[in-house]
Amino acid sequence: MTEQDRLLDELHNSVMNTKQYAISIGEDLNEQDKMLDELHTGVTLAADESRRQNSNVGQLLWESENRGFWIAFIVLVAILVFLICL
């Protein structure tokens, strides 16, 4: 019986160690899940900001192109008026 008791104690200790490992792994997974959620939130915010900035750059480029067109048009009209007045 003594040998059987010793083996049962070893088995019990092994099961308890396995339980502690499982609890520790579960805690680590919960912590990593929270970290991934925070990362996802940060990436989502960064992507939204990037889209907003891209939209702003597109608007700025469109306004710049229009502004350049109108400046060139006014300069050409001024030259035309100057040449007509000569």
Image (cartoon, rainbow, N blue to C red):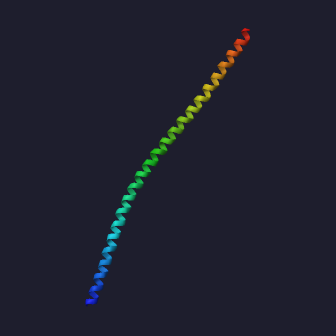
> Residue furthest toward the top?
86
Whether residue 61 is situated above or below residue 40 in the rendered picture: above
Query: Which quadrant, please, contains the C terminus?
Result: top right
**Residue at position x 30%, y 81% from top?**
10
Q: How many marks?
A: 0
Question: Where in the figure is residue 55, as x and y percent of width and height?
Answer: 53, 37
Whether residue 12 is situated above or below residue 41 in the rendered picture: below
**Residue at position x 40%, y 51% from top?**
38
Question: Where in the figure is residue 19, as x and y percent of width and height?
Answer: 32, 72
- Quarter residue 75 falls in: top right
Horizontal side of residue 67 vs 47, given as left or right: right
Whether residue 15 is situated above or below residue 67 in the rendered picture: below
Horizontal side of residue 79 vs 22, given as left or right: right
> Residue furthest toward the bottom?
1
Horizontal side of residue 5 vs 42, given as left or right: left
- Quarter residue 33 falls in: bottom left
Question: Where in the figure is residue 52, as x and y percent of width and height?
Answer: 50, 39
Query: Which quadrant, please, contains the N terminus?
Result: bottom left
Question: Where in the figure is residue 31, as x and y percent of width and height?
Answer: 36, 58
**Residue at position x 33%, y 67% from top?**
23
**Residue at position x 64%, y 25% from top?**
69
